[in-house]
Image: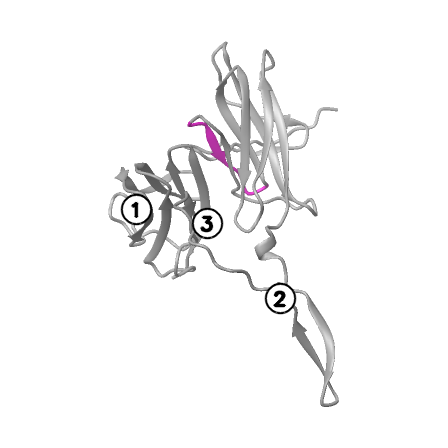
Amino acid sequence: MKMMMTKRWLTGVAAAMLWGLAVAAPPLAANEHWITGWVCNAGGEPLPYANVVVLGTKLGAIGGEDGSFVIPHVPAGTYTVRCSYVSFQPSTELLKIGSCGAQTVSFVLQIAPSHKPVMHECGVVSGRIALVEKHAPKQVKQVAAPRFALAQNRPNPCNPATEIAFELAHRTRARLRIYDPAGRLVRFLVDETLNPGPQAILWDGRNDRGRAVSSGVYVYRLEAADFVETRQLVVLK
C-alpha cells in the first residue's frame, strides 16, 4: 500500500514542505541539484522559519512551519551550508553536490550560551529560603570592531510600527526585506550601499503597495556581502 502525502509549495525564499518519506522539489536543469533538510532543537522539536544559506552564494531558504527547507537550483560542487535561528547557536555542514539530484542534511541547533537560564543556589536568609543568582566574574569591556549583525526589532510585538537595527562590518550593499510566513515579499526596506557601523530603519507596518499588513508573524532578512541573517517579528493589532 502506497503512502499518500500532501505537499504545499511556498514561493520566493520560503521552503517547500518536507516530511517523512518523500521530498517535493521544483523542476531543475540537467546540471542543477537541490539541498533539502530539517531543522530542530536538541529535543527533536522542529524550529519553524529557520534561516539556511549556502555560504559564498546567493542561494538560501527560510524553513517551513515544520522545520523543513529546500534550496533548489544548486550547481554541482562543494559548499558550506549554514543554519541559524534566533537564540540558538548557528551550525554549518560541508556538502558535496555531485550527480545525485538531491542532497539531504539535518541541523540540530543548541541554545546559545547567552540565552541559557541563570543558575541559582539556595540559601537561608532570616529563616526564609532565598534564591541567590550566581554570575560569572566581571570582565573588562573592550570596544568591539564593526561586524555584521541583525538585531531583534523593537518593539516586538509591534502595532504597527517597529524599528529594525543592523550593523555592517564595512561599506557594502545591503538588502533588508520583510516576508510573510508563506515566503511572499511584503516590503523592500533597504537596497543601497551603506557605510560600516550601526544602521536602523523604521517599518510602518505597510507593504510595498502602501497597505497596512494584518496581524501575524513575519520574517525579516538582511543580506550584506556574504552575510545573511533572518529574524522573526510579530504584528499584533
Q: Is residue 67 left or right of residue 150?
A: right
In the image, what residue occupies the spot 58% across and 40% down? 67
Residue type at mark 3 is Gln
Circle 3 residue:
232
User: Above or below — where is 151 with respect to 135?
Assistant: above
Is 65 contained in the magenta span?
Answer: yes
Residue with the most extreme front position: 140
User: Above or below — where is 204 with respect to 39?
Assistant: below
Q: Secondary structure at mark 3?
A: strand
Whichever of labels 3 and 2 marks the residue nearer the N terminus, that label is: 2
- Between 224 and 25, the residue placed more toward the observer is 224
Image location (x, y in percent) of residue 2: 71, 24
Image location (x, y in percent) of residue 145: 41, 47
| Labels 3 and 1 touching (C-beta < 8 A) | no
Q: Quadrant of the C terminus?
A: bottom left
Residue type at mark 2 is His
Circle 2 residue:
135
Residue at mark 3 to residue at mark 1: CA–CA distance? 16 Å
Q: What span is colored magenta in the figure?
A: 58-66
Circle 1 residue:
207
